[in-house]
Image: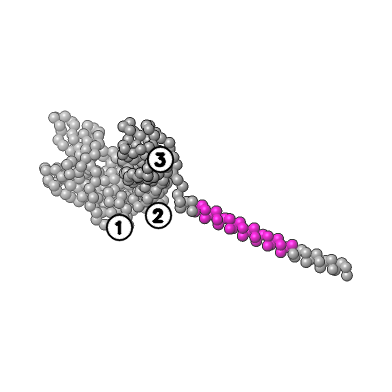
Amino acid sequence: MRNLVTVGLALVVFTGWASPAFAQTLNDSESSGVGIRLVDVPEATKDDPRTFTSIIDRLAPGATIDRRVEVANNSGSERTVRIYSAAATVHGGRFDAVSGPSSNELTAWTSFDHESLLLGPQETAMVTVTVDIPVDASESEYYSVVWAEVRSADIGGTSVVQATRAGIRMLLSVGPGNGSPVDFDIGALTPARDTDGAPTVSAVVRNAGGRAVDIAGDLTLANGPAGLSAGPFAVQQATTLAPGDSGEVVFTLSDELPNGPWDATVSLKSGLVEREASATITFPDAGVGETVAPNESPVLLITLVSSGAVLLLLSAATFWWLRRRRAAAAAALAVDGSRAAASVSK
């Protein structure tokens, strides 16, 4: 089993009305009545902030992992808490989890040492989450969520109950070795003004690696009218992208900002991976402005210039060597010709 470190971060909580499906709304764990937090993360990934709030790992077929979570009853009365896993997907820049129990490959591989807890007011308990990867598991990314859920009694004699749940995401990559690294790149930037006239900037992001990424970051503006600067402005909502997917991150800026032009710099990160892109943008008076490609990276330009210089030197050296060789060959022919002429005259 891998070395683990202990962490302690609260996670998001969802509430919903069940009959039979759940609608999800964001809530606070202390006021909602149920909470869950991840206790263990692998020692090797403790520097990655994503592993403090989600179960993220790369596993070989046949591997088994255990992760402890702490479940809390934050209410003032005794509650029964159900623990279960549900299928999840990553699409459209979102990590979407099914509210009730549902199945996919990862949920079938997941088990718990406690599937139900009876907790007193403000009481907590540890639950071990075990994932057993089959030896014949396909090389892929798998997503699910671990839910801790409490339900009310039937409301007014109906079959409708209120359900409150807190969840921890699971994003597991299965395959031999370390797999493809995490990577993403930033594409075109589009300035705009929303219906209220507030300026916005959207940036296209592409997952260029082999693992799902959670994109967050900020935007800064510089060299605006009269030398103005503004920001940083944070991403409105983190964007989750599966390998090969593209999506947009959006920044909403201050209403007072003039149209520009501005030198915009987008700084994004997912875990330990950081990327930056810059471009000159101008906000429209209304609607969507001109989409602009980011400036080429100085590192890339230096690489291209260096590569060009190396090619030029190689070409010059080759040309010099060929000239020397041709001159030597011509001299040798001249000597042979002189010897032949002298032999004939004799």
| Front label number (1 vs 2) | 1
Residue 218 circle label: none
Give SS at disc 1. Answer: helix
For residue 198, what is the image quadrant? top left
Q: Residue at x 26, y 57 (%)?
A: 5
Which is nearer the eye, 188 or 262? 262
Segment tinted magenta in the rendering: 303-330
Dot 3 amino acid type: Pro
Q: Position of residue 61 (x, y in %)?
A: 37, 51
Q: Which residue is mark 1?
A: 43
Q: Position of residue 277 (x, y in %)?
A: 41, 46
Q: Position of residue 36 (x, y in %)?
A: 21, 47
Residue 177 circle label: 2
Dot 1 amino acid type: Glu
Which is nearer the eye, 123 or 273? 273
Q: Residue at x 37, y 35 (%)?
A: 192
Magenta-colored segment: predominant secondary structure:
helix
Q: Which residue is mark 3?
A: 261
Q: Residue at x 21, y 34 (%)?
A: 17
